[in-house]
Each structure stands twice: as C-alpha cells, then as structure tokens.
Amino acid sequence: MSSTAEKTMKTDSMFINLGPQHPSTHGVLRVGLTIEGELITKAVPDIGYLHRGTSKLAEVRGYHHCVVLTDRWDYVAAMPNNLVFCLAAEKLMEVQAPPRAEALRVLMCELNRVASHLLFFGTYGIDIGAFTPFLYAFREREMILDLFEMACGARLTYNYIRLGGVMADVPPEWLAKCREFVDYFKPRIDEYDTLLTYNPIFMARTKEVGLIPAADAVSWSLSGANLRGSGVCYDVRKSDPYCGYERYSFDVPLGQTGSCWDRYFCRVQEMRQSIRIIEQVLGGLPEGPTMAAGVAKIPKPKPGEAYAHVEGARGDLGIFLVSDGQASPYRMHVRAPSFLNLAILQELLVGNKVSDVIAILGSIDIVLGEVDR
C-alpha cells in the first residue's frame, strides 16, 4: 500500500457497551466506549443499576437498625462498613467502646481486608487470563469466612460491630483457630508472588498499563491502594488513627508508577501488613467487656453532627451523620471510596486499547454495592 493511500485511510469510530451484564465488570456497571480501531477515544461510566437509597432509608430507621444497611454497601468487606457508622454514631451518642471491643473491631476489620484482597487477587487473575490463582485465593478466603461464621453466624453481611462495641465476645477456640489460620496463611503470600505477581505474562499485561500519576490520583480524590499505588502515602489508620491503630506496628505499601501492577502489588503487600496487625492484636488482646455500658435500646443523640472515617478495603470510607434529637438520623451521607475511585475511569481508559480495559477496570477493584448504594 502506498504512503498516499495510508494517509487518506480513515477509521470509523464505533460505540460499544461494556456491561452492565458482563462478568469482568464485577457487577452491574456499564461503560460506554467510543473506539477507533482498537484505541479508546471516549469512556463514560454509567452507574446506578444497583441503587437502593440507603441514605434515605436511614432517615426512617433507628441507629441500631442502620448498621444492618451498612453491610450491603461493600459486601465484600462489610466489617469496616459496620465500624465507620458505629464510630460516627458513637460520637453523637458520646459513647466509647471498651478496649476489648476496640481490639476485636481491629481484628475483624483486618481479617476482612485480607478476605477482600484475596477476592481481588483471584478474580484479577481471571480478568487477565490466569484461572489457577482463583483456586488458591478462595481456599484461604474460605478459612476467614469460617472464622466470621463462628463469631457471628454470617459469612457475608455480618452486623457484628454494634453501637458501643461488638455483638458478642469470641470464644477461646475462635482465637486458637485464628492463630492457626495466621500461621498457615503467611507462607501462602509467597506462593501468590510465585504464581502470579512475578509471572512474565501477567507483568507484561499490567506493568505499563493504566498509569495514574500521583498528582492525578490526588486530584481525582482516589484513596486506598489506588492512591498508594501512585506513590502517595495516605492511610487513614496512620493519618487519623481510630480503635487504637496507633498502638500497632505496620507499614504502608507504596507503588512507583501508578500502573495496574502497582495497584495489584499494593494489595498483596497489604495482606502481609494486615497479618502483622492481627498477630499483634492476638498477642495483646485485653480482657473485659465487649459492650459499653449505658447504650440505649432506642438512642436519641443530642442535636449535632459527626464525621468518622476508616481505611476500608477500597480506601477512605467516611460517614457524616446529622442528629436532630430524634430516634433516626436526620441525614446520613456516605463517602464511598469505590464511587470516587471509579470516576477516573473516564480519563484513564482514553488512549488505551480495548484489550486493556478489563485490566484497568479490575485494578481499580470496585464493588458496585458501594458505588450505587
């Protein structure tokens, strides 16, 4: 073909729908893609397919009942959802959870972080084309869900963390089983690195793809591994400690270039750090009650407002509560990390190939229950 013919050739643009029924969107997400050849020229995320109006539902439910709603946001890591609402409500109620309850809250949230990252690790491998890591990840994740079931009877939506503490203390056999899991799990992370992290094909698909510079990550209000993967050191557990996190020793893993691989690797390293925290909690679990005294069955906090935030599995998860002195919150607003992390997709996908869309989307690690609410 002559050079003149090449210059006059024109590629027609095409509009295609990715989702909302697509296994690799990890939920009911629709992304409207405009492509020219294999390159994406425009990407428009379309959300709301899972919207249930939990902020409005909270306005007609008691504070205790609102905890049940939180389980349904990030249903892959529901413990931090329970915790952040309870922390905000406890500020309004002027209640402080006892030391043992705080330690159990940390323990459950870190176990849930590991379970969430295991789900990411397994499904992200499938997104790229590697099925085997999924089998490894779910083997270990089942052990954590068994611990949750043993503690509160549930495996997905826990309602374990309650206003003023936790629903029940854990029995001695639970603690023994948790220590057994920790000893078993630590060497498994090295297996994950051998199996997927440093796999040449996996690295070729992710190492130079989906780059998010640190300035862009901050500008788009990213948080969690999506922010730290770009080299920005921000973790709520360090910057604004809660539940005694300042007493535990752990590192904040950081990426370098903000690539898909950096975001993936941060989550793998975070599992190591969560295990460090779990070991410290188990080694110094205080005795005493697991529920604060004087928590009303129907709380009616004094008029006022409160904000609390925690480091959820997907980033900075915040709750803003307003009380008018009645039995239900006057207003509840959720700062959902998945919702904010997803926004950058419209900029991030442009200029990339269609074959990289799933790798980029999977690396952001969204949960649609938290995006839509």
Image (spheres, rainbow, N blue to C red):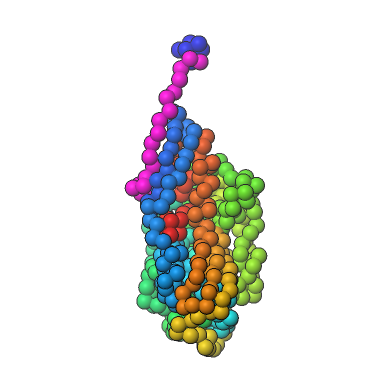
Task: Report the span colored magenta.
Answer: 7-24
Residue at image coords 41%, 67%:
57
- Residue 203 visible, this angle: no
Residue 18 percent location from the top left of the image: 39, 42
Please tell me whether residue 13 belongs to the stretch shown in magenta. Answer: yes
Query: Which of 253/52 is in front?
Result: 52
Which percent across, then down, holds residue 8? 48, 14
Give the side of residue 142 with respect to residue 194, left or right.
Answer: left
Q: Nearer the viewer, residue 52 or 225?
A: 52
Picture quarter with the N terminus: top left
Q: Residue at x 39, y 68 (%)?
A: 156
Q: Nearer the viewer, residue 88 or 244?
A: 88
Q: Using the rendered view, name the quadrant where residue 249 is placed.
A: bottom right
User: Would residue 106 appear left or right of 148 to someone viewing this image?
Assistant: right
In the picture, the quarter occupied by the C terminus is bottom left
Residue 254 seen in the current view? yes
Q: Quadrant of residue 319?
A: bottom right
202 vs 292: above or below: above
Residue 229 vs residue 35, the one in the foreground:
35
* Residue 327 image point, x, y percent: 46, 78
